[in-house]
Amino acid sequence: MKRLLASLSVALALIAGAAPAVEPDEMLADPALEARARDLSTELRCVVCQNENIDSSNAGVARDLRLLVRERLVAGDSDKEVLEYVVARYGDFVLFRPPWKPITYALWLAPALIFLGGAVGIAAALRRRRGRRTEPLTEQELAEIDVLMGHSGKST
Amino acid sequence: MARLLIALPALVAVLIGALFLWGLDPDRDPGAIPSVLISQPVPEFDLEPIDGVGVPGLSKADLAGLGKPALVNVFASWCVPCRAEHAVLTRLVEDDGVTLMGLNYKDKPADAAAWLARLGNPYTRIGSDLSGRAGIEWGISGVPETFVVDATGTVIYRQVGAISTADDLAKIKAALAAAGSGDVAS
C-alpha cells in the first residue's frame, strides 16, 4: 500500500503542471529565498516565448532573468522591488497580471461594465414583461373554451 | 430613448468592425513588445573591449558624451541574421557616415574578433557583454537589435531583429535624421 501511494504521488507529480526549467546550478542555497524566487518567476513573462513564464522557459534570456531575480533577492529586495526592477527594463508587458494604471483602466473595468450593462438590460426586459398583465378570461370565453374542448356540460 | 435603443445594434456592429480593422491589420505585429527605453536615457552599463579588435569598450558615458547621434547594434558571431545585417550596417557607416556602436552579446571574444576580422569592423566602439547583463539593462529579447541614440544619450528608436527590409532601413534613417544626424539622407 505504501509503495502504491509512493508511486502514485510520483506519477501525479510528473503530470502536474509545466516542468520548471530551473536548473540546479541556478538555485539558491536558502530554501525560503528560492521559494520566493520560484513564485516571482511564475509572475514574469519570458520576452522571447511570450506566453511562457520565465520559470518554465528554456530561452537564454529567461535563464538570465531567473538569475537576476535571485540576485536581487539575495541583495535584499522585496518581491515588489524585484518585479519593479524587471519592469523598469522590460515594461509592464513582462507581468502576467497587468497593473492598475490609466492605460489599463479599460482592461480592468470592461468586464464589470459589460456585466453591468447586461444586468441593466435583463432588469429592463423583466420589468417590461411584468408590466404586460394579462386580463382574466370572461365567463363567455370560458364557456367557449369548454365547447371547444368537448366537455360542455352535455356528456358525449 | 427608444431611438437610441434601435441604433444600439448598429453602434455595436460599428465598434466590432473598428476592432477587427485594427486587429486584422497585416502591418500590426501582435508579438511586438513596446520598449520602455524610448525617450529614456541610455541605461547604466560599462563594458570591456574585445581583445584583438582594436576598438575601445562601450559604456553609458561614451554614448551620452558623444555629441552626435549613434546607432547601437546588439550582435553576436553566433547569430545568423547578424551576418546579413552586417553588410547593411557597413553601408550605413561608409555611405551615410553613421556612427555605429556595438554590443557584442554573449559571444566569446575570440569568436567575435575572428568574425569581425573576416567581415570587417564597422563599429567605432564595441562592448563585450559576455554575461548578457547589459543586454538585460537594454531590455533586449534577442539578437540582433538596434537602437538609435541621439546626441544627448537618449534612446529614440528601437529595431527588434535584423535591419533587413527597405522599410526597416527607412525607419532607422528617419530616426537618425530626427536625432539630428545631418549626413543621413532619408
Image (cartoon, coloured by chain):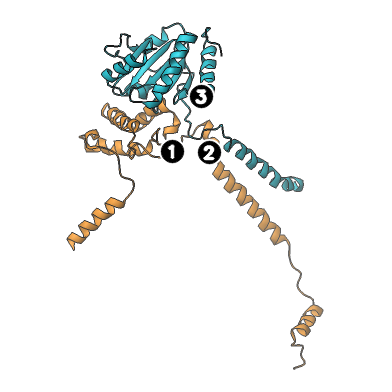
Chain colours: A orange, B cyan
Q: Quadrant of the C terminus of chain A?
A: bottom right
Describe residue B140's horizontal placement relative to residue A124 as left or right: left
| Disc 1 and disc 2 on one polypeptide chain | yes
Which of label 1 and label 3 is nearer to you? 3
In the image, are marks 3 and 2 on the same chain? no
Q: Earlier in the sequence, mark 1 or mark 2?
A: 1
- Residue indicated by mark 3: B165
| Mark 1: few/some/many CA within 10 Å (<14, 14-19, 20+) | few
What separation in Å lies between label 1 and label 3 (alpha carbons)? 35 Å
Q: Residues within 10 Å of mark 2 (few under 14, many from 20)?
A: few
Name the residue tied to disc 1.
Answer: A97
Tell me the kind of residue under disc 2: Leu
- For marks 3 and 2, give the CA distance: 35 Å
| Chain on which label 1 sits | A
Secondary element at image label 3: loop
Q: Position of residue B105 (x, y in %)?
A: 34, 22
Outermost residue to the bottom: A156
Q: Look at mark 2 in the image and give the residue it sits on.
A: A107
Name the amino acid type tagged 1.
Arg
Q: Chain of mark 2?
A: A
